Image (spheres, rainbow, N blue to C red):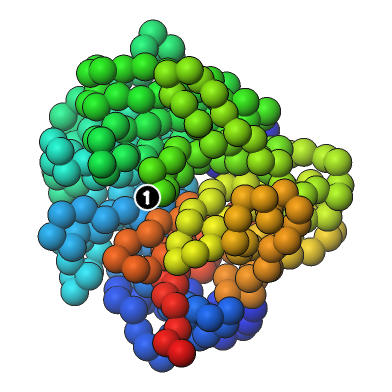
Amino acid sequence: MNHSKHSLLFLILCSSLIGQVNEPNSKEGFGLKVSTYHSVNKEIKFGGFTHIAFGPGGSEIITACITHRFLYRNSPKESFSVSPLSVRRHHSVVYNPADKLYYANDTDNHRLISFADPSKDSITAETKEIYGIKLQRPHDTVIDPETGWIYALNPNSGHIFRFTAIGENESVIKAPTQGYTRALTFTNGKLYAIGSSKGRIVEVVDWEKQTFKVYDSFDPTGHQGSAGSWKTTGLVLNDAEFFKGHWYATSYFTRAYAKGTDFNENKFIRFKTLDDMVRGNWTDISSLVPSGLTPYFLTVNENKLYLATFNHESKGSGDCILQFEPTKN
């Protein structure tokens, strides 16, 4: 996150203790059933959720960015535990089945780390630079499951790094994101950089030739920012992910940056194609996310979509992981 990240019923749901999806704590809309998958609770008060990732054997790991912790469990039937790993304002993590390691961006320590077991305070490898370029608050890490390439991101410069393990087969390109960039997405065999300030999605067409295709979101404001609201900045993209025939995109909209405007409008949207985003042809599905919570990184796993959320104004208040699945017709 950069700060220089509808109902009353759902607010109550996100404040309750939920280790697994609980059917009574769910609702439907836009052809989706949304449930609270995990939330801040009395046993584990660490919040500021920015991402959830899935590892081997049904294991799960949550990035609790604001409280500098990973939460982990070996299966959805277990409760989450707090990892002893020492990180600072980390944003995301990904599991690499090729070497059986997790890769995470340790954002405010300006490094990338790998580790085998989140229950232990043991790092396999770390680096503060890739291909000779220093890491500056790296934000997102994704993997191409077909090739094993791992990608990481410097948010302010637009540098995207590619490697197979820390220190191995490194290369870098610079994407034309035009401003602050929070996320990477790998979907349908293609890599995308999610330009936050510009509300821009950049497709990497050819890594070796460094060619790109740019999609600028419809923006009636003409303004940019690392956070805002629909009426003050246009989209301030946190992430975008393709799921079941639609793109889903989140924006860093919050009361503190909204200048008195509606900070919920268009914070979570859905569209068929990237060209639809350019034309402003999307559906606002923000009502599926509790009012006042900022939606951050998205994750697709086993035909379900997961969304990490947090409360920008009141840290840890209502923070939750939401789960979306298509309703049966």
Task: Tell me the residue at 38%/59% (across/down).
Answer: 300
Q: In the rendered view of the protein, which quadrant contains the N terminus?
A: top right
**Horizontal arrangement in the rendering, residue 141 relative to residue 100 (left or right):** right
Is residue 186 at all visible to an observer of this figure?
yes
Task: Tell me the residue at 72%/49% (across/down).
Answer: 278
Task: Tell me the residue at 45%/44% (across/down).
Answer: 185
Q: For label 1, count other residues whose C-alpha is less than 10 Å away and answer few (under 14), some (14-19) or many (20+).
A: many
Q: Position of residue 175 (x, y in %)?
A: 56, 25
Foreground of the two, 3 or 198: 198
Is residue 257 at all visible to an observer of this figure?
no
Q: Amino acid at mark 1?
A: Thr
Task: Tell me the residue at 56%/40% (across/down).
Answer: 194
* Residue furthest to the top: 132
Foreground of the two, 230 or 220: 220
Foreground of the two, 115 or 276: 276
Q: Position of residue 41 (x, y in %)?
A: 38, 70
Q: Position of residue 308 (x, y in %)?
A: 46, 59
> What residue is pinned by disc 1?
63
**Horizontal arrangement in the rendering, residue 92 relative to residue 77 (left or right):** right
Vertical position of residue 320 compared to residue 194: above or below = below
**Horizontal arrangement in the rendering, residue 176 relative to residue 35 (left or right):** right
Q: Position of residue 238 (x, y in %)?
A: 57, 47
Q: Secondary structure at mark 1?
A: strand
Residue 146 sits in quarter? top left
